[in-house]
Amino acid sequence: MTTMHHQSVLTAITILFVYYLETYDTLALTVPDSPTSPSNTYIIQVCENKDCLKQFPSTGGVDGLFQVLSDLIHPMTTNVVLQRSGCLSHCGKGPNICISSTFMKTKTNTFSGVKDVYIASGILKDECNVEVSPLLLAAVDMMSQANRGNNVTFVFLFIRNLPFFKNWCYPWLMYHKVSSPEKKIQLLSSVIDQLSSDVTNDDLKGSMALLHATLMRSNVYLEMIPPNIPFALKDVHYCVKLIGFMEGIINKDHQHLFESSSVLFGKVYRVLADAEEASGNYNGAKNAILEWIRLNPSFKAKAEKDLLRLNRMLNPK
């Protein structure tokens, strides 16, 4: 009787426990989203007015702040959507961005004077709960600095054997002038090597930052006197592969990354067209221009002129 009694008690406890779990799950499903909930999406509008564009330092041929934010966001981040915007007011105080969320649809926060990667990173952390890795932050800052007169070289130090510092990245700063293409290539090569080696166990091989840095280096190779066409082609073909890789790992929840980065993707094919033409591959240049039009239809008129010119070179009279 005692054994049967114990079994009955255990059965009753099990039933109550299962009921509790089911009730808990049901209650959990009815809890509204919070600002930190994964289902909460932040929408960042970046002013593309000419005044704001002029107030952000150049970052390698792609309009500044929007590209920096895209570079800073990890490729698998799903809760942030970047949008290009018209004037957001506060002219003269830019660059300006406006952040809203699906959790508080009626509330928007506007931030002015977002002039460097560290301010942008802080806003992503404080307003969108997006933690930018130290490696990615250092890399994006180096990319920005590499395109200006005063530059910063980040020597990445990885302390891998100490338990409290394993896989941490520490940027060490050395200020100097960068004027020659060779020095710019050295800086960008450091960025590319660090992002593609995945030393921090944080897979950045599909990041916009890696794509952007490689494209910048390809541009530098083309701008050299004389241009280094083979190396430029190698880099820009790698960019095309990166786009394919990103399309393979990013699902429909990340589709906004492609929509917001169409300018950068189009720039890849524009540079590819220039490199192919410089190498004498005019058909390859035409194919690249057609892809450029598909991604950036606003350049259709200019692209059509380039296609006519290439056709004349292919079929001289």
Image: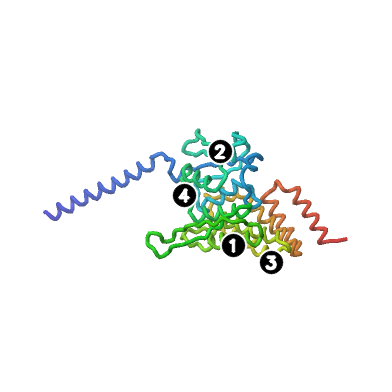
Query: Quick one: SS at disc 1?
Result: helix
**What is the CA distance from the residue labelled 4 to the residue labelled 1?**
25 Å
Q: Earlier in the sequence, mark 3 or mark 1?
A: 1
State the residue position of label 1. 189
* Mark nearer the N terminus (2 vs 1): 2
Amino acid tagged 1: Ser
Q: CA distance from mark 3 to mark 2?
A: 42 Å
Q: Which mark is residue 112?
A: 2
The reply to whether the C-beta atoms of the residues labelled 3 and 2 are less than 8 Å apart is: no
The residue located at (35%, 41%) in the rendering is: 27
The residue that disc 4 covers is 131
- Please give left or right for residue 45 compared with residue 201 in the image: right
Q: What crowding class fits label 1: few (fewer than 14 Cα within 10 Å), some (14-19), or many (20 or more)?
A: some
Residue located beneath label 3 in the image? 230
Quadrant, the N terminus: bottom left
Of callouts 4 and 3, the N-terminal one: 4
Q: Position of residue 254 (x, y in %)?
A: 53, 50
Contact between labelled residues 1 and 4, with CB atoms less than 8 Å apart:
no
Marks 3/1 in contact by CB < 8 Å: the verdict is no
Q: Residue furthest left?
A: 1
Q: Which SS class for mark 2? A: loop
In the rendered image, the quadrant that contains the C terminus is bottom right
Q: Amino acid at mark 3?
A: Pro
Q: Nearer the viewer, residue 267 or 283?
A: 267
Q: CA distance from mark 2 to mark 1?
A: 32 Å
Quarter residue 95 falls in: top right
Task: Check the image and name the residue furthest to the right.
Answer: 317
Classify residue 182 by image quadrant: bottom right
Mark 2 is surrounded, within 10 Å at the Cα level, by few (under 14), some (14 to 19) or many (20 or more) other residues, namely some
Whichever of labels 4 and 2 marks the residue nearer the N terminus, that label is 2
